[in-house]
Image (spheres, coloured by chain):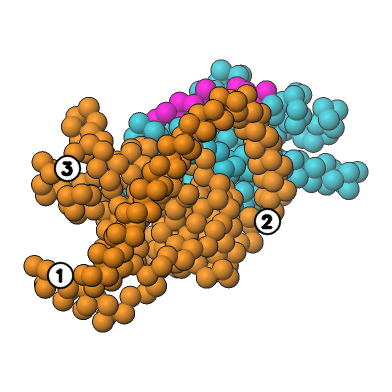
């Protein structure tokens, strides 16, 4: 029984790593620079958040940190700033989802969006304090808006393709219920 | 696995400490990156050396797909293009004749005046592996690095003109910061007036030029070439042509084809020894 549960959580870890890996590969693709005007939404944030709200027990914080550090390295961003900030946001969402149980879709959207907005402005603040050249404000806002709009699609993909779903019943019942979902 | 027992007070405290330490670890690495940027970037390039091959199995097929779709697109316009190209070729032949004649004349004149020209430019060609992935930083990765003899600061060109400069060299790859990146500053001169200026990247495909003393001397369509100031960059590499935007601000229409960056050449620049600079100063004062 314990073994089976272990395997199950490992399947989730591998799924998370795979989806983040695919997102990063697409972002790395040498597209025509001109078309890069199309801003990439912060997909890794969305996937992580959607995961934490649905399956808070199946995404260890060390895995999140690993993916974010890799993404910082590969996407040539300031190392470690976004991981530090977003980890706080993620843990807040995990705590919220573990303690208060399942959210309604509307509540979830509001929560996820406000956390992202807060984190983005924290990041801009940090960049100002540390005198890091930050991208033009218009671009940040555009990317933010794009990210917010695309969240429902990410939820859909998580739910239907990756089978990352809410537990049926209350969260504290634990993992026994989740097996039926799989 | 403490998170699965939310009611366990002891486990929760440990977990909290664990998360806090991870956050501090990230912040610490950020501060290290900020303080010792050049070293951190070197570490990043080393990490990229290891990481990039693992992305290759996804990147390779995707790159193939995109080139196929490009191919299909180009077939449809092929006939038209062919006709246009033939016409152009005809004109080009005439131009070539003229150019060869001028070249000869030019070299004779240079010889007469004892002018030292740029040492013949050598270059290494590399394939674009990926772009930075964020629209804020305009840079890309080339598949050539320290093993191929690439150095920081060297100029990168495509078949028609300057694209950017090397910023960060790994063992097997190097990073190119494009001219349009907002951190890019390239000393240029404008021909034929010879005005010195600075090409400042601002994330647009038509970067502005700044610090020009006599703006009246400059006309739209003037050639913009690198000036070679700072002795890292080769001089007289074509960058683009001057245009004026709606606010009468001087901008450069780049000649490099930013829409299709695939193979790029890195120009090997020799480190300049002081006697060279001295010679330059002397010739300058003589001509003054």
Separation of residues labelled 2 and 3 (CA atoms): 47 Å
Residue B1 among magenta residues: no
Figure check: B3 above or below B18: above
**Residue B198, percent from left and from top:** 24, 51
Indicate whether residue A153 is drawn in magenta. Answer: yes
The residue lying at 31 percent from left, 68 percent from top is: B117
Question: Are tags 3 and 1 found on a single chain?
Answer: yes
Chain letter of the residue carrying label 2: B
x and y, in percent, of residue B167 in the image? 43, 60
Residue for badge 1: B284
Specify few, some or many for label 1: CA neighbours under 10 Å numbering under 14, 14-19, or 20 or more: few
Provide the secondary structure element on which disc 1 rests. Answer: helix
Identify the residue under disc 2: B53
**Left or right, A154 with reference to B212:** right
Circle 3 residues within 10 Å: few <14, some 14–19, many ≥20 = some
- Mark 2 or mark 3: name the one nearer the start of the chain: 2
Q: Chain of mark 3?
A: B
The label nearer to you, 2 versus 3, is 3
What secondary structure characterizes most of the magenta part? Answer: helix
For this rendering, which residue is in front, A98 or A41? A41
What letter labels the chain drawn in cyan?
Answer: A
Question: Are the residues tagged 2 and 1 within 8 Å (C-beta)?
Answer: no
Q: Nearer the viewer, mark 2 or mark 1?
A: 1
Mark identifier at residue B87? none
**Residue range highlighted in magenta:** A141-156
Give the quarter of the image for residue B125. bottom right
Residue topped by disc 3: B218
The span from disc 2 to disc 1 (Cα, nearest Å) is 50 Å
Per the image, label 2 sits on a secondary structure element best described as: helix
Residue A98 pos. (x, y %): 64, 34
Question: For mark 2, does the 10 Å Cα neighbourhood hold few (<14), some (14 to 19), or many (20 or more) residues?
Answer: few
Task: Kindly indicate whether the residue at mark 1 contacts the one at mark 3 (C-beta within 8 angstroms).
Answer: no
């Amino acid at each position: 029984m314990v073994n089976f549960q272990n395997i199950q959580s490992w399947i989730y870890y591998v799924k998370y790593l795979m989806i983040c890996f695919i997102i990063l590969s697409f972002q790395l693709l040498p597209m025509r620079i001109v078309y890069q005007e199309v801003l990439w939404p912060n997909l890794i944030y969305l996937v992580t958040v959607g995961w934490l709200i649905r399956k808070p027990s199946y995404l260890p914080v060390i895995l999140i940190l690993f993916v974010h550090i890799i993404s910082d390295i590969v996407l040539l961003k300031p190392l470690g700033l976004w991981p530090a900030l977003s980890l706080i946001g993620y843990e807040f969402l995990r705590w919220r989802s573990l303690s208060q149980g399942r959210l309604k879709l509307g509540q979830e959207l509001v929560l996820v969006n406000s956390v992202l907005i807060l984190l983005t402005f924290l990041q801009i603040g940090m960049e100002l304090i540390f005198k890091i050249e930050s991208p033009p404000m218009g671009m940040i806002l555009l990317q933010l808006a794009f990210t917010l709009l695309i969240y429902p699609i990410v939820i859909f993909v998580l739910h239907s393709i990756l089978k990352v779903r809410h537990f049926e019943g209350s969260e504290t019942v634990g993992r026994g219920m989740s097996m039926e979902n799989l | 696995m403490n998170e699965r027992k939310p009611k366990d007070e002891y486990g929760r405290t440990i977990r909290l400490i664990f998360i806090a330490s991870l956050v501090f670890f990230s912040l610490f690495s950020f501060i290290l990156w900020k303080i010792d940027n050049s070293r951190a970037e070197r570490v990043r390039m080393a990490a990229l050396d290891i990481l990039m091959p693992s992305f290759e199995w996804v990147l390779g097929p995707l790159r193939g797909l995109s080139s196929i779709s490009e191919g299909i697109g180009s077939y449809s316009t092929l006939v038209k293009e062919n006709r246009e190209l033939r016409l152009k070729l005809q004109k080009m032949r005439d131009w070539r004749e003229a150019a060869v004649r001028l070249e000869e004349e030019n070299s004779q004149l240079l010889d007469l005046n004892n002018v030292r020209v740029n040492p013949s430019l050598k270059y290494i060609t590399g394939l674009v592996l990926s772009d930075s992935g964020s629209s804020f930083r305009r840079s890309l990765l080339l598949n050539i690095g320290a093993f191929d003899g690439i150095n920081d600061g060297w100029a990168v060109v495509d078949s028609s003109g300057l694209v950017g400069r090397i910023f960060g060299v790994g063992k097997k790859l190097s990073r190119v910061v494009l001219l349009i990146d907002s951190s890019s500053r390239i000393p240029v001169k404008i021909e034929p007036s010879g005005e010195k200026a600075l090409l400042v990247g601002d994330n647009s495909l038509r970067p502005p030029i700044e610090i020009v003393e006599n703006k009246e001397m400059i006309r739209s369509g003037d050639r913009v070439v690198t000036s070679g100031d700072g002795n890292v960059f080769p001089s007289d590499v074509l960058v683009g042509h001057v245009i004026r935007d709606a606010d009468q601000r001087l901008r450069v229409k780049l000649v490099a084809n930013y829409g299709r960056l695939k193979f790029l050449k890195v120009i090997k620049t020799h480190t300049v020894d002081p006697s060279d600079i001295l010679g330059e100063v002397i010739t300058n004062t003589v001509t003054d």
